[in-house]
Amino acid sequence: MERRGVKIYTVRFLPGQELKSGLEDFVKQHQLQAPFIMTCVGSVQSATLRFATPAGENTSKTERVKSFDNENFEICSLVGTVSPMGSHLHIVLGRADGSVVAGHVVGNVTVQTTAEVVI
């Protein structure tokens, strides 16, 4: 049986870069197998998220998608798996007033100042 250690990568995204597609490009470029997000800090200016369906409701996936544009958010949490074949990421974003928005990343997440990700 071959033993392998965990390889850890850090990636920094700059203002205007797209977080999801950038992570997928990084994973493809480095041919990573089964990568997952360990932690992420930074800020974003826009995001497209899908929310969970409330219990007892039967809404379509598109009805639960919302885009947040030109709004400054702190990244409070980013978790999930990354793959060029389809990522599964969830994010929690904090607003200036302390409220949060959270959901499944389904579209662009545009970096505001920086995003530092550990994979």
Image: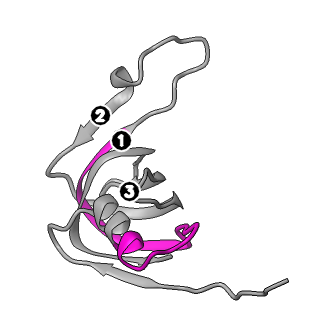
Marks 1 and 2, how far apart in space? 6 Å
Q: Earlier in the sequence, mark 3 or mark 1?
A: 1
Per the image, the residue denoted by label 2 is 66
Per the image, the residue denoted by label 1 is 49
**Residue farthest front in this picture:** 1
Q: Is residue 82 left or right of residue 13?
A: right
Residue 117 place in picture, x, y as percent: 42, 76
Instruction: Name the residue rendered at 32%, 54% in the picture.
Output: 95
Per the image, the residue denoted by label 3 is 94
Residue 68, quarter of picture: top left
Q: Amino acid at mark 3?
A: Gly
Give yes or no for residue 47 being in the magenta stretch. yes
Q: Nearer the viewer, residue 89 or 3?
A: 3
Identify whether 5 is placed above or below 92.
below
Q: Amino acid at mark 1?
A: Leu
Classify 10 Å Cα crowding around label 2: few (below 14), some (14-19), many (20 and above).
some
Residue 56 place in picture, x, y as percent: 60, 11
User: Are the two marked residues, 1 and 2, in contact with CB atoms closer than 8 angstroms?
Assistant: yes
Marks 3 and 2, how far apart in space? 16 Å
SS at mark 1 in the image: strand
Q: Amino acid at mark 2?
A: Lys
Q: Earlier in the sequence, mark 1 or mark 2?
A: 1
Q: Is residue 13 left or right of residue 39?
A: left
Q: Nearer the viewer, residue 102 or 20?
A: 20
Instruction: Name the residue rendered at 43%, 50% in the picture.
Output: 86
Q: Earlier in the sequence, mark 3 or mark 2?
A: 2
Identify whether 70 is placed above or below 51.
below
Instruction: Name the residue rendered at 43%, 85% in the picture.
Output: 10
Q: Is residue 102 left or right of residue 17?
A: right
**What's the magenta region?**
26-49
Residue 36, quarter of picture: bottom right
Residue 22 place in picture, x, y as percent: 29, 67
